[in-house]
Image (tube, rainbow, N blue to C red):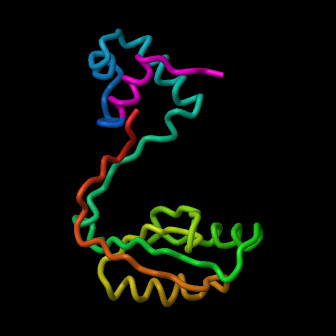
Amino acid sequence: MYTPDEIDYQILRTLQKNAKLTTKELADAVHLTPTPVFERQKRLERNGYIKKYVAILNPEQLGKDLLVFCKVKLKQINREIADDFERRIRHIPEVTECYNTSGTYDYLLKIRTSDMKEYQQFVLNKLGVLESLASLESIFVMSEVKNAYGMNI
């Protein structure tokens, strides 16, 4: 099993800030030459430390101004019902993140829509038709205070 060293962590931290860096730019940032940085980056990818590279889009520019966290409780929970719910949620584009949670609710969904009217239609036509759904609670985000788009490593 591969264990990253401090240079690998420097590479990961640097890529979290800007994944568009060229190999040369990344090498300069971690004070190495491009060839070993390229090899380290590929090894980090192969070993699952880097899952993928994405562009972070501006939701407001794209007309997706409403951010909602939706807590979902299922009528009952077992492997078959959970698998079915998760499979269906994966295919709903408004749901950008979904977490199975402990506590009063079974799942926490992160949802992006253009406005309250679109969210209402989403609840009625997409979540509301799921037979396993017992209840939901919506939390509307007024402003985003912090989103680091990464983790502290």
Q: Quadrant location of residue 80? A: bottom right
Q: Quadrant of the C terminus?
A: top left
Q: Quadrant of the N terminus?
A: top right
Q: Is residue 96 above or below residue 73?
A: above
- Left or right side of 51 for 16: left
Magenta stretch: helix, strand or loop mostly: helix
Highlighted range, magenta: 1-15
- Whether the magenta-drawn stretch holds residue 7 is answered as yes
Provide residue 75's location: percent of width, then percent of height. Answer: 67, 83
- Left or right side of 138 for 84: right
Q: Residue, x 26% and y 54% (percent of image)?
A: 146
Q: Quadrant location of residue 74? A: bottom right
Q: Residue, x 41% and y 79% (percent of image)?
A: 138
- Whether the magenta-drawn stretch holds residue 151 is answered as no
Q: Residue, x 41% and y 17% (percent of image)?
A: 7
Give the number of marks: 0
Q: Is residue 14 above or below residue 59?
A: above
